[in-house]
Image: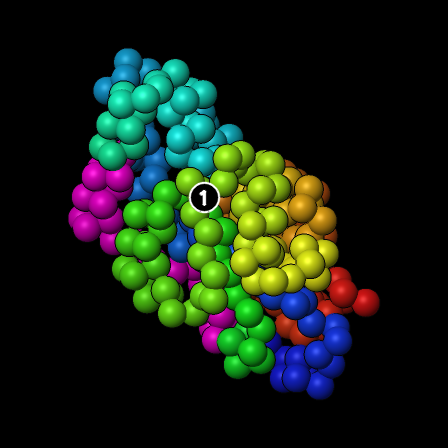
Amino acid sequence: MDNAFSLNEKLLPAAVIFDMDGTLVATTEADFLAWQRIFIESGHQLSFEDYFPLLGKKSHDVVYQELKLTGANAEDALQRKMKYFAEIVEEKGIALMPNAEIFLQELKSLNIPLALATSSRKTKMEMVLEEVGLLSYFDVLVSGEAVEHGKPKPDIFFLAANKLGLDPKDCLVLEDAVNGVKAAKSAGMKCIAVTHTHPAGDLGMADMIVHDFSELSFPVISSLFR
């Protein structure tokens, strides 16, 4: 990222809020396989095409809305899903998205507060961040169960901004999923979408679309805050 960031602080976002799955970390395959197993155990099939619209949704909402499970049955399904996800990650591993950590390092060097706002549950969020070594980058962490309404509702981004002590309109969101982009825009935030999991044509609500974090420079980001 261009060092001109430090010379034009008024054009910077007050904070950058990241989604996790599919944005910073390549967890989509492991997440799909874990959900597929839960669906099968609940008497349902789940193709990747069926899974795609679920990206960005709270795990509880998937269990409740798609599998019609409630109470103890829902909690059991969520615990099993986490168990399967952890087993798949242990077997196959997970990786950071290209240039993700470089981008985080550059933002931190400019003293820009960073938050993570993920639809994943707290247990999964912490496990993934520790696995890939990103936990220390974030000033604020917000997981899916911290809000009543998941993405595409804006609740999780409002909560992240509140925890940062900032006006939502001064924050920038990095997202990869349609539900996440909708949530960011509903919160009144600027949003850059990365095409890690969805094609650009599906992410048209974003203020900007890039294919990789390496495309993000000072002139690119500052143009959103003029």
**Of 135 and 97, which appears nearest the observer?**
135
Task: Give residue 132's position: percent from left, percent from top.
Answer: 32, 62
- Tell me if residue 57 comes above or below residue 95 in the rendering: above
Splitting the image into 4 quarters, where does residue 141 fall? Answer: bottom left
Look at the image and tell me whether residue 49 can be seen: yes
- Tell me if residue 205 comes above or below residue 108 in the rendering: above
Which residue occupies the extreme right position in the image? 226
Number of marks: 1
Q: Of the residues shown, which amino acid type is indicated by label 1?
A: Ala
Task: Give residue 19's position: percent from left, percent from top.
Answer: 50, 52
Residue 105 on the magenta segment: yes
Q: Residues within 10 Å of mark 1 (few under 14, many from 20)?
A: some
Q: What residue sits right under mark 1 in the picture?
A: 146
- Tell me if residue 68 comes above or below residue 56 in the rendering: above
* Residue at 29% over, 32% down: 78
* Residue at 36% over, 64% down: 135
